[in-house]
Image: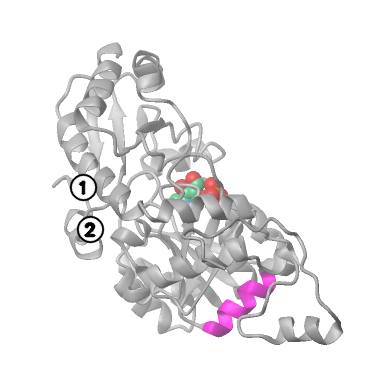
Amino acid sequence: MATPLVPPMALASVYTFADVDGLDRAYGATPPDFTYCRDGHPNARFLSDALTKWHGGAWGQVFPSGMAAIGAVLLPLVKAGSRVIASDQLYGKTTHLLVGELSRFGVTTTRVDTNHLPAVKAALAAAPEPAVLLVETVSNPLCRVADVPALADLVHATGAKLVVDNTFASPVLCKPLAFGADVVMESLTKIIGGHGDTMLGFLSGSDPDLGARVTATASTWGYHAAPFDCWLTARGLDTLDLRVKAAAANSVRAADWLVGKPGVLQVVFPTRPDHPDHALARRILPAGPGHVFAVELAGGRDGVNRFLRAAGADLPFAPSLGHANSTISYPDAASHRNMPVAEKLAMGITPGLIRISIGSEPFEQLAAALGKGLNGI
Ligand code: PLP
């Protein structure tokens, strides 16, 4: 039979076998043959293999969401009494998973400024059982850049594991495993999916033993990634490099374009010389820090509302990122909604701060939409 150019979609939830010996052979194969879709299916494996290769990992696994992936790497690494050291700049829900959920199982979290390496070293030294250091390559939403090689050295001196959420960068711009991270995580819902119509997450790592424990966790806790979402996301991989580079180039131009415009108080993006990680970003993300940045608008929340209403459908207010066309989010009420106000302000999430996810539309179209919004302030 001729081979299809693209992978077919395999929707079966279960596979059939001629006899018990056949089932045993399926479980015993390397990698295991498909038996039950919670344990794996062709579309998840196709997607996972492609992303694992891209990241240079020894193992990979697809999850139903980015949050599921973060949970699935933490579960096998922690136990009651363990300490997680986490960046104080993480996506709000990740912080909540650590502080609001894992704490109920006796796992404590220390949040530190991971751009201050002595503070990280001190937090690791102070922890009785440091298990994990969790950082984002480029943080949500203030684009703080993680010095992954330096953090990996500090973490490995203690026997803990470095887990890097690479969602803002994607493997096109950064491969944290090559810098010494133990595990890389991607929310595939964002620019890797890229079209605003799927929800998935992904983990890859360098240690096959940890990979086996993550896979067992995924099956036992029921982290099943739907075949259709895997199929759609795999389809998007063909254009990922193009999309990420186009959006990254648009972002540099958009950030520069916004600086000094009426209504714009600050543009927060590492390509700008006033960003605290301007130099670090060139080392960790030489092809650019990605497609997401933050802008402080005049007039606080009212100013943001006026901007959004004026921009309208030309620049949709959609609390996610990584869509093919540019979208706006509002960290104060979306990604960091449940965080105490004082913590948000300490992070730099003010009532006037919007997060822009730049797409790969023509720059003139994007600039016109941004201008329309600014005119409304
Ligand atoms: N990590 C980062 C940096 C994110 O921005 C998000 C979602 O916004 C996630 C993880 C969670 O991913 P998902 O929404 O696919 O669960």
User: Could you tell me residue 22's position as x and y percent?
Assistant: 79, 83
User: Could you tell me residue 113's position as x and y percent?
Assistant: 37, 58
Of 26 and 113, nearer the camera is 26
Question: Which residue lies at the image location 66% right of the left edge and 85% below the top edge?
Answer: 29
In the image, is residue 313 part of the stretch drawn in magenta?
Answer: no
Q: Secondary structure at mark 2?
A: helix
Query: What label sits on residue 281 in the rendered view?
Result: 2
Q: Which residue is mark 1?
A: 275
Q: Secondary structure at mark 1?
A: loop
Q: Are marks 2 and 1 in contact (CB under 8 Å)?
A: yes
Of 363 and 342, nearer the camera is 363
User: Could you tell me residue 330's position as x and y percent?
Assistant: 43, 31
Highlighted magenta segment, given as a residue range: 208-217
**Distance between the alpha carbons at the discs numbered 2 and 1:** 10 Å
Camera-nearest label, 2 or 1 = 2
Question: Which residue lies at the image location 20% right of the left edge and 65% below the top edge?
Answer: 283
**In which image quadrant can residue 44 be found?**
bottom right
Question: Which residue lies at the image location 68% right of the left edge and 59% below the top edge?
Answer: 224
Of 236 and 156, nearer the camera is 236
* Quarter of the figure that contains the C terminus: top left
Where 53 falls versus 209 (above or below)? Answer: above
The amino acid pointed to by label 2 is: Ala
The residue furthest right is 19
